[in-house]
Image (cartoon, rainbow, N blue to C red):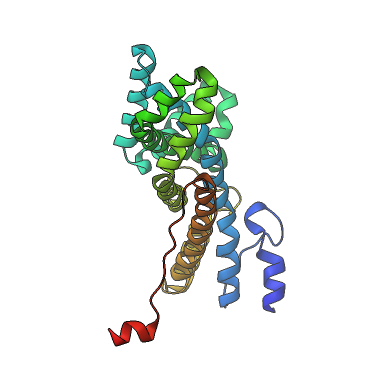
Amino acid sequence: MSCLQTIQDYALRSVGIGERLLPREDFTLCEQITLIGSGMIWNIYFGLIAIAFGFFAATAVALAKNSQLYWLRKPAEFFVYVFRGSPLFIQMFFAYALFVVLKQSLPFLAPFTSAWLGAALVLFLNTTAYTAEIFHGALQSIPKGDLEAADAYGITGWTRFKRIVWPSMLRLAWPAYTNEAIFLFHATALVYFSGFPVWQQRGDALYYASYFADKTFNPFIPYPILAGFFILLTLVVITVFGTIGKRLNRHLPQAVIRRPGFMRTLMR
């Protein structure tokens, strides 16, 4: 089988498109790269779902934690403390066991026992807690002069939040939030070890890497391939978030850094 045919058969296998049976013997490098790359679709799915919903949820939790109202601040503090204080791996096991128990009396919770929904929910809650703490720290660091200037111009309420508080919070929090996004995509590999089962052998990238390592008794090929895919994914995250960060800080003066030439450095 040619590599092109392998890509056609297995590139989308993790989402149910293409060949259903996994290779059994004579594993080629192309098969390993293709199937592990196919599994990355699920890792990207978990990360994007958690980030997309967690970003807005974390903003609400950070505002609640920064509130002067006791009944609003304490639940937010408790939520952040629980999900930041417990390991993500334990959260996944606990959530799966809880959904299995609740499914017996509440059948509509059955989909939550699958990785595509249950694991995504746990990752969403976890990144919401970590991001909320980052955003809360940024809210505390907003220059008071900006808020005083808003008060002087009579800018209050939603307009003040939309035009001053929220943009300033994002600018201050963005470098740390970029790191959280990277860690989140890396944490999607834990779904394989959690209690959430794969569906019809359509697992994430670590599922396929472990499959090849078990069959070939050689972990030095599939796991470096897996690491390479995650490195590429990290580069994409850094590029996208870096572009957004530059957009957020476009009004600030950009320092011009002159790199010394090689000959100039050598003469010194």
Where is residue 213 drawn, in percent x and y? 45, 68
Where is residue 17 drawn, in percent x and y? 71, 56
- At x 45%, y 36%, the residue is 168
Query: As rendered, which of 261 and 33 lies closer to the eye?
Result: 261
Where is residue 106 drawn, in percent x and y? 55, 21
- Of all residues shown, which one is farthest toward the front? 152
The answer to whether residue 134 is above or below residue 145 is below
Q: Is residue 17 left or right of residue 84?
A: right
The answer to whether residue 6 is above or below residue 49 is below
Q: Is residue 19 left or right of residue 156?
A: right
The answer to whether residue 129 is above or below residue 68 is below
Say whether residue 99 is visible: no
- At x 46%, y 24%, the residue is 150
Say whether residue 247 is visible: yes
In the picture, which quadrant includes the C terminus?
bottom left
- At x 48%, y 59%, the residue is 234
In the picture, which quadrant includes the N terminus?
bottom right
Q: Is residue 138 left or right of residue 36?
A: left
Where is residue 26 drawn, in percent x and y? 57, 78
